[in-house]
Amino acid sequence: MLPAFLKLFDGLPAILVVAQRVVWTVPAALILALLINGVRSLKISRRTLGLLAVSGVLIGTNWLVYVWAVGQARIVETSLGYFINPLINVAIGMLFFREKMSLIQISALGLALAGVLNQTLLVGAFPWVALALAGTFAAYGLVRKLTDVAPAAGMVWESGLLLLPALACMWWLAGQGQPLGGGSWELTVLLMLAGPATAIPLILFAGGARQLPFATLGLLQYVAPTLQFATGIYFGEAFTPAHAVTFTLIWLGLALYSWGSFRALAAARTAVAGTKETPTG
């Protein structure tokens, strides 16, 4: 439901909303880290700090593109990015973890590519917002997968490393005459709430990802872009027949990918059950 929340900031510069989001994410993430894992979870190595600096830049870029896109009435395109994201994760698994791609996964990626080409050729607009969001979030997930840190503690460091640039942006905006609180106490309160609205979902996602089967997690990742898509339509964004072709190709790819994931999971369970059987007689 984040796009509907961000719509409340229409008229404010995207960089101000993101800077405020960073500033208020720091205390929200810190409180959660202390409550969930304790103060020891905040102690990290230099290598981990370097990785979190990279993931911080990636998630900060993702936030900036996302907030800007919502303000430009491009929520539907942001949903396209998060529909593509699971398929990009498949490609990352092959490139970085030497995971073998099945014919089903290759076909799903092919459908996603066809959707991007349709968006570029028939709709007449290269979906850079969607690809930027999908690419930065997939890369963020890759870096966090390689980083040995508790989810909440990682968010503390990521937002903390972005804090100085965020404050510098706010100082510059103030020099341009921009009210940092949005011009009213209501917007000030809402901007403060952007911190918890950012930290809580990301921390819960990172924690939940460790507890759920991959196939279940993959399907749950379609919930957010589906709600984003519906929100964009609710706000009256354009959705032409050419857009419908793009999304249909992406959705077909996701359906094929999900079917392949469940089939692989069922086969793995069957194999495990077979090894546990003992001969009788």
Image (spheres, grey):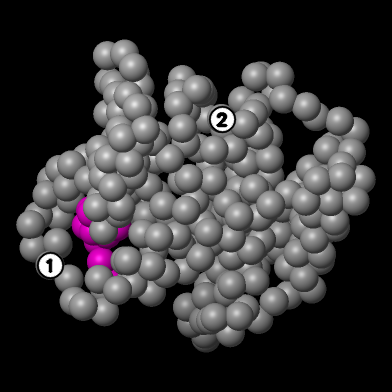
Residue lying at 25% horizontally and 66% vertically, measured from the top left: 149
Disc number at residue 71? 2
Mark 1 lies on residue? 43
Q: Secondary structure at mark 2?
A: helix
Alpha carbons under labels 1 and 2: distance apart: 38 Å
Q: Amino acid at mark 1?
A: Lys
Viewer-proximal residue, 269 or 251? 251
Where, by quadrant of the figure, is residue 256 drawn? Answer: bottom right
- Determine if residue 215 is in view: no
Residue visible at 51% across and 22% down in the picture: 10
Q: Nearer the viewer, residue 194 or 265?
A: 194
Q: Position of residue 153 (x, y in %)?
A: 22, 57
Locate residue 74: give its quadrant. Answer: top right
Report helix, strand or loop for mark 1. Answer: loop
Give x and y (percent) for residue 113. Answer: 80, 60
Residue at 77% x, 70% y is 106
Amino acid tagged 2: Gly
Measured as percent of width and height from the top left, residue 216 is found at 53, 52
Task: Specify the principal SS of the magenta part.
Answer: helix
Tally of marks: 2
Q: Nearer the viewer, residue 9 or 108?
A: 9
The segment highlighted magenta reads: 148-160
- First in residue order: circle 1 vs circle 2: 1
Is residue 234 located in the magenta-colored stretch of the structure? no
Q: Residues within 10 Å of mark 1 (few under 14, many from 20)?
A: few
Q: Is residue 243 above or below residue 186?
A: below
Foreground mark, 1 or 2? 2
